[in-house]
Amino acid sequence: MSDFDVIVLGTGLKLLLFILNFEEFDPRTHQDMDPHRSTMRDVFRHFDLGLSAQHGGTYMLNRHVDDIIIENGKVAAVKSQGELFRCKQLLCSSSYVPNRVKKVGRVIRVICLLNHPIKHTHDANSCQIVIPQAQVHRKSGKFIAVVSTSVETSNPEKEVQPGLTLLEPIMEK
């Protein structure tokens, strides 16, 4: 049996993939991290690992969870592959605790591939800044736009249609 302040289940994959694919002289692999200026704290924050990384948490990756032990209404331990890991706090995907999750809404998200910039966005209430491809030495000539909203009706496709209309013509969605 091991004791930990925090156990994090199943997260950290993005950081591991970042490390695996990192090439020092290829800025496309840096994911907005400057290898000469970014601290490890910056990296942890970028990959949402700040709580555990700074406070001695333990990551349990690629392990099957047999049980989550609850004592007095609080998480006390995680049982994994025959071992018991006691903890004061557990951070995990809702898929590990489906009986303790309450669905409060849905989101529709449409990812569109365009071959042109979005028209008339100077007065938009919301937009995302994208680094032009020339600045990162890319020549694809394609654009990506995401339209999303909270679902409020039984026809979510109709709910995102006003946003999709702004993007016309759409190559693929």
Image (cartoon, rainbow, N blue to C red):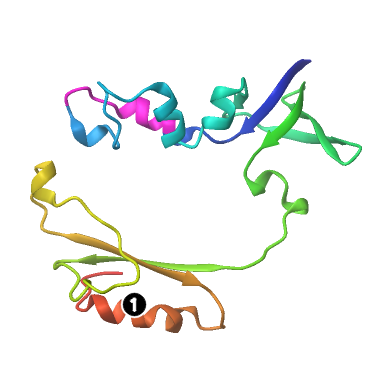
Please tell me which residue is depicted at 44% across the width and 25% down the height of the picture. Answer: 41
Task: Read off the residue under disc 1.
Answer: 163
Three-letter code, disc 1: Gly
Q: Going by the image, does 113 lie left or right of 10?
A: left
Q: Going by the image, does 32 lie left or right of 74?
A: left
Q: Quadrant of the C terminus?
A: bottom left
Residue range highlighted in magenta: 15-25
Residue 72 drawn in magenta: no
Please tell me which residue is depicted at 36% across the width and 31% down the height of the picture. Answer: 18
Please tell me which residue is depicted at 70% across the width and 34% down the height of the picture. Answer: 90
**Quarter where residue 4 is shown:** top right
Residue 16 shows in this picture: no
Instruction: Tell me if mark 1 has few (under 14), some (14-19) or many (20+) residues whose alpha carbon lies within 10 angstroms of its own.
Output: some
Please give the count of numbered marks on the rendered protein.
Answer: 1
**Quarter where residue 26 is shown:** top left
Q: Residue 120, relative to residue 113: is it above or below?
A: below
